[in-house]
Image (spheres, coloured by chain):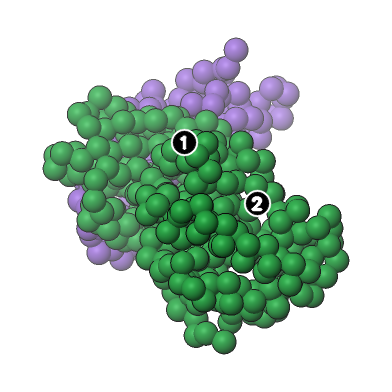
């Protein structure tokens, strides 16, 4: 069982604001990225993001999670919450004691670090914190409510 | 009973009685469009029997770059329902259906065509039709119609809706089986060849874990002649590495002077736009409507 590090503001507060959907906490590995994307899209939509932003949030979380799977511990945990018009996606790889198995390169080369570049394009802010317990990446989106 | 062998839709011979098994409507329509296109180009008369309205068939062909309206006007192409042809009301008789086919082959000869191609959507056999037990006898009887070597028939069975017993009972009467060349298929992702227009089709969601089959599909697309369509109308997600792979392949092809169409939903399209593909020479980014 992964310990609750009592991060992620939305989780502590009283259920309070009826507008704010419950935060999402989900573990993932290479076999559950599809389920992760599906859950993120549902939560981003419930938080009020417009269609385009729902896709951007889903894509950003996928790239962060894929990084944790491929270059980190091979698995990780996502926390996603909405508060004050801001959607925060936090992906931690739970330590990188052993790097994931390196896959054979695809026949068509892709730029290294392209995933992070995409996140930088779609998110309003991206912080990556390398700590002793592993890497935690936080992508922040100012919600664009559809009109 | 003829031994079953796999064939590409573009390789069918004049006297083939092919069994197309499809998993989704898009696959059936793609393969049928290629069958019709190649038949018209060879100067054959083409019949397409399905439950869809004739106008819908024409629209589906046009959407796939097969201009059949002129052929329909001249009588070379006929899209029609099964009623009054294979079926009488809700009744099916194998002898009657085979006889109808034989008359069509004869008529096409009298009209001066060098042969006949018939595509039959077998979806009618899933309805409560009297005489359906004669289906294997119908499939067996088709061989007699094709004996002259100037007609071919493509029977289309939905492999998800027909039970395995029925499929097995009719499979042996066909000279070959046809399906889309598939590079990858699981419940989340399908990567396969597209025949009309030529290219590849990617549906579902794709990420780096499918980079290998995607690379194979792109490599084969590069080896096809002429312009290429990468049909992603049914693709809900593409991650950064796969988007970059497709973009690289598209650039490789346009650098060789070949036109590339990327058909995709808005979210996937944005990924290509970010890579500067929207305004690249020879590349057309087409936003597909919701499917």
Residue B21 in which image quadrant: bottom right
Residue farthest along the top direction in this orientation? A147
At a point 22% along the width and 28% down the height, the residue shown is B280
At a point 41% along the width and 69% down the height, the residue shown is B13
> Are discs 1 and 2 both within one chain?
yes
Q: How far apart are marks 1 and 2 (CA)?
A: 20 Å
- Residue B210 falls left or right of residue B176: left
Residue B50: mark: 2
- Residue B10 falls left or right of residue A18: left
Q: Name the residue under label 1.
A: B70
Residue B287: mark: none
Residue count near mark 2 (Cα–Cα under 10 Å), binned few <14, some 14–19, many ≥20: many
Q: What element carries label 1?
A: helix
> In this rendering, is residue A22 above or below B39?
above
At a point 20% along the width and 51% down the height, the residue shown is A109
Residue B285 in which image quadrant: top left
Give the percent coordinates (x, y) of residue B222.
23, 52
Q: Is mark 2 on a helix, strand or loop?
A: loop
């Amino acid at each position: 069982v992964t310990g609750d590090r009592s991060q992620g503001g939305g989780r502590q507060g009283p259920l309070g604001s009826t507008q704010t959907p419950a935060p999402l906490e989900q573990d993932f590995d290479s076999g559950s990225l599809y389920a992760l994307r599906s859950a993120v899209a549902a939560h981003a939509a419930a938080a009020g993001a417009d269609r385009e932003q729902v896709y951007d949030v889903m894509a950003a979380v996928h790239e962060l999670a894929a990084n944790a799977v491929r270059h980190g511990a091979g698995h990780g945990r996502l926390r996603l919450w909405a508060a004050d018009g801001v959607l925060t996606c936090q992906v931690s790889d739970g330590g990188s004691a052993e790097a994931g198995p390196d896959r054979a390169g695809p026949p068509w080369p892709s730029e290294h670090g392209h995933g992070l570049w995409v996140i930088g394009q779609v998110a309003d802010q991206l912080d990556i914190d390398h700590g002793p317990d592993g890497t935690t990446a936080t992508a922040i989106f100012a919600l664009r409510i559809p009109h | 009973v003829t031994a079953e062998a796999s064939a590409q839709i573009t390789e069918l011979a004049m006297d083939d009685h092919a069994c197309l098994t499809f998993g989704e409507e898009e696959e059936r329509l793609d393969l049928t469009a290629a069958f019709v296109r190649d038949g018209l180009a060879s100067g054959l008369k083409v019949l397409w029997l399905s439950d869809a309205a004739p106008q819908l068939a024409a629209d589906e062909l046009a959407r796939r770059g097969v201009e059949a309206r002129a052929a329909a006007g001249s009588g070379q192409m006929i899209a029609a329902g099964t009623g009054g042809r294979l079926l009488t009301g809700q009744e099916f008789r194998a002898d009657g259906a085979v006889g109808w086919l034989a008359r069509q082959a004869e008529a096409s000869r009298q009209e001066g065509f060098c042969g006949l191609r018939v595509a039959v959507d077998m979806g009618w056999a899933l309805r409560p039709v009297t005489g359906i037990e004669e289906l294997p006898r119908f499939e067996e009887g088709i061989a007699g119609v094709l004996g002259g070597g100037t007609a071919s028939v493509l029977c289309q069975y939905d492999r998800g809706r027909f039970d395995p017993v029925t499929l097995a009972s009719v499979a042996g009467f066909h000279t070959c089986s046809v399906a889309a060349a598939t590079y990858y298929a699981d419940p989340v992702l399908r990567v396969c060849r597209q025949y009309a227009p030529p290219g590849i089709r990617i549906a579902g969601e794709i990420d780096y874990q499918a980079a290998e089959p995607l690379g194979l599909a792109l490599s084969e697309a590069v080896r096809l002649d002429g312009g290429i369509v990468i049909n992603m109308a049914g693709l809900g997600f593409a991650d950064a590495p796969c988007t970059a792979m497709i973009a690289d392949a598209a650039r490789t092809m346009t650098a060789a002077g070949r036109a590339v169409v990327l058909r995709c939903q808005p979210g996937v399209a944005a990924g290509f736009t970010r890579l500067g593909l929207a305004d690249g020479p020879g590349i057309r980014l087409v936003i597909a409507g919701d499917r």
